[in-house]
Amino acid sequence: MEMTETPADAVVREVWEETGLLVAPTRILAVLGGPAFVVHYPNGDETQYVSTMFDCEIHGGELRDRGDDDEIQAARFFSRDEALELNLSAWLRPVILRLYRRGPTWFDPPTRSPA
């Protein structure tokens, strides 16, 4: 997200920049974080992601393949089974399974009390 940008604005901008599709978020599918989202960088830095995943409708644009981009290898639509065959981060495999079910919004409930 850019400074002063809302999560919904960020998803619209990022999808446009990365795929060429103009989307409208319709609902939050998941809010995810925790130990599975800890990332270790080659330089020794460590961070933890919190991801908000949106369901979106495509309202325009055209899917473009930006294979020469340093963030995108290819852009296309995948079936669930095709997506699971990709070289994915460990945290993404169980998320893919849940996203394709398109059930109610989910998040992991608290595991401890602050008191």
Image (tube, rainbow, N blue to C red):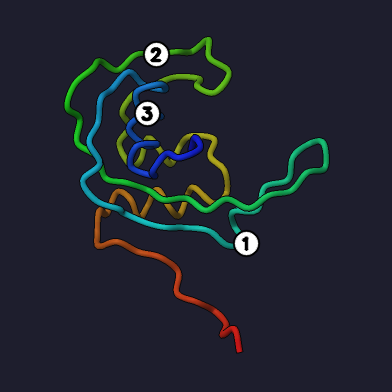
* Residue that label 1 marks: 35
Relative to residue 29, is residue 111 drawn left or right? right
Q: Residue pushed farthest bottom?
A: 115
Callout 2: SS: loop
Mark nearest the camera among 3 and 2 is 3
Q: Amino acid at mark 1?
A: Pro
Which badge, 3 or 2, is on the more N-terminal residue? Answer: 3
Q: Residue pushed farthest top?
A: 68
Q: Amino acid at mark 2?
A: Asp
| Residue drawn at point x = 45 percent, y = 40 percent | 4
| Residue drawn at point x = 82 percent, y = 36 percent | 43
Callout 3: SS: helix
Which badge, 3 or 1, is on the more N-terminal residue? Answer: 3
- Residue 30 placed where, x, y %? 37, 56
- Residue 39 placed where, x, y %? 67, 47
Classify 105 as above or below 21. below
Mark nearest the camera among 3 and 1 is 3
* Residue that label 2 marks: 65
The answer for how far apart the CA atoms under marks 1 and 2 are is: 32 Å
Q: In front: 82, or 36? A: 36
| Residue drawn at point x = 38 percent, y = 43 percent | 6
* Residue that label 3 marks: 13
- Residue 108 placed where, x, y %? 45, 69
Q: Residues within 10 Å of mark 2 (few under 14, many from 20)?
A: some
